[in-house]
Amino acid sequence: MMKILVTGGTGYIGSHTAVELINAGYEVIIIDNLSNSKEFFIDRIEMITGTRPVFVNADLRDMNELNEFFKNTNGIDAVIHFAAFKAVGESVKDPLLYYDNNICGMTNLLKAMTANKIDKIVYSSSCTVYGEANKLPVDENSPIKKAESPYGFTKQVGEQMLFDIAASKEMKSVILRYFNPTGAHDSSLIGELPIGVPNNLVPYITQTAVGQRDMLTVNGNDYDTPDGTNIRDYIHVVDLAKAHVTALSRILSGKTEQDAEVFNLGTGNGNSVMEVINAFEKVTGIKLNYRIGPRREGDVISIYSDTEKANKVLGWEAKRDLADMMLTSWNWQKAISNSTNNN
Ligand code: NAD
Ligand code: WQD
């Protein structure tokens, strides 16, 4: 059985990926410092799959903890690296926190991997690297724009580190640029757990619908789009998780065509904020309380993915639609709102 280290594996995308990895027959070891997640996600992964992943509470910023981990854990075949901070606004307020966690944390991980001769990594990047793209849908050759935030910069640096290490032939990587992950596992046992006020649209919608927030504010309806609201490519987290299994198997079986390969992970469909709200209202039958507010600083107007490379080269395709994303997000919201674990 291949042994896969998943950093950030109790987090939103990491926990869904751990489930898909176990279902695909991999042995999963999770490192997470629980800075943005809870340990009960390990129980939930076990409830879904029947297998409990090994969990190590360690911080990638602490080289001693990492060395200790690798000293005690042999035979890791590859790493999927999710662990990072991801709040754009927080990164603007405290850039050093983001440089330290996302860049130093990843540097430590790569150093430890190199020292332990682990040379395969799948990396969580983001469509944020494209900024406001010159042409839509955006493909992997679109230029990387000056980052809009320190968070976005850390994703670019992470990619560049992997390109540089690939050039030195020390590591093979698959870089996955996610568009807008949303939705939750069908079991409603795992899903996104925003700590504090959510920045992202869908958790804000579900928290408003459940009564935890008074009202959603739509960040501007005067953009140059059909209904005036921003367009994004929302992708179901289970589809995204499955893409990691595909990427992993590609890298493990030596099928990668370059030492650092890049894939967009999106559906290829652009949906506006109003379309997301309408889809939510339709599948849940709930009338959402919202108002139109001003534009949010730094928002790109429209972005959605060219999926051809992921479809043809990676051999992966998103299957689940916006209605499914809204329904599973809502079921998860109701489940956590009823759960005493969420405190
Ligand atoms: P998340 O916050 O739910 O998961 C990240 C996990 O990493 C958390 O469990 C956190 O506790 C852990 N972590 C953070 N810093 C750590 C450290 N120094 N040591 C150990 N563990 C640490 O976030 P997510 O949405 O699952 O995102 C996963 C990855 O995907 C991140 O790298 C993020 O930048 C990237 N990404 C996310 C999105 C999105 O919208 N969710 C979009 C594009 C890219
Ligand atoms: C989507 C749309 C908002 C909240 C962010 C990061 C990006 C990536 C994905 C990690 C926008 C609007 C939102 C609200 C709203 N993450 N909105 N009211 O901005 O596309 O991307 O998450 O890499 O880096 O920037 O996602 O969910 O925040 O916003 O109207 O209360 O919803 O203005 O148009 P975004 P989002």
Image (spheres, rainbow, N blue to C red):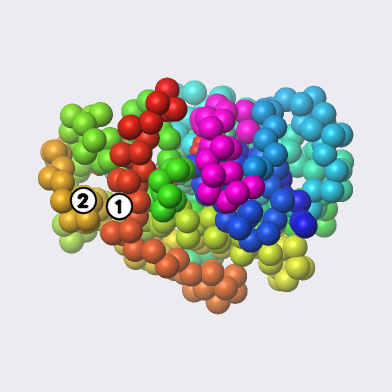
Q: Nearer the viewer, residue 220 or 183?
A: 183
Horizontal relation, residue 311 to residue 284: left or right: right
* Whole-percent x, y for residue 323 in the image: 28, 59
The magenta segment: 32-51
Location of residue 105 by image quarter: top right
For the residue labelled by badge 2, is the local secondary structure a helix, a strand or a loop?
helix
Give the quarter the ligand 1 occupies: top right
Quadrant where the C terminus sits is top left
Q: Nearer the viewer, residue 138 or 58?
A: 58
Q: Is residue 257 above or below residue 330?
A: below
Q: Which residue is mark 1?
A: 326
Q: Which mark is residue 284?
A: 2
Question: Is there a contact, CB below 8 Å, between mark 1 and mark 2?
Answer: yes
**At x 15% / y 42%, what residue is drawn?**
288
For badge 1, the amino acid type reads: Met
Horizontal relation, residue 74 to residue 58: left or right: right
Asked if the residue at label 2 sits under 8 Å from ligand 2, the reply is no
**At x 53% / y 32%, what residue is drawn?**
40
Quadrant where the N terminus sits is bottom right
Numbered marks: total: 2
Horizontal relation, residue 219 to residue 122: left or right: left
* Whole-percent x, y for residue 301 in the image: 30, 52
* Whole-percent x, y for residue 28 in the image: 69, 47
Q: Nearer the viewer, residue 73 or 81?
A: 73
Query: How busy is the neighbourhood of tag 2: few (under 14 within 10 Å), some, or many (20 plus)?
Result: some
For the residue labelled by badge 1, is the local secondary structure a helix, a strand or a loop?
helix
**At x 72% / y 25%, what residue is drawn?**
62
Horizontal relation, residue 207 to residue 4: left or right: left
| Residue 151 seen in the figure | no
| Residue 317 seen in the figure | yes
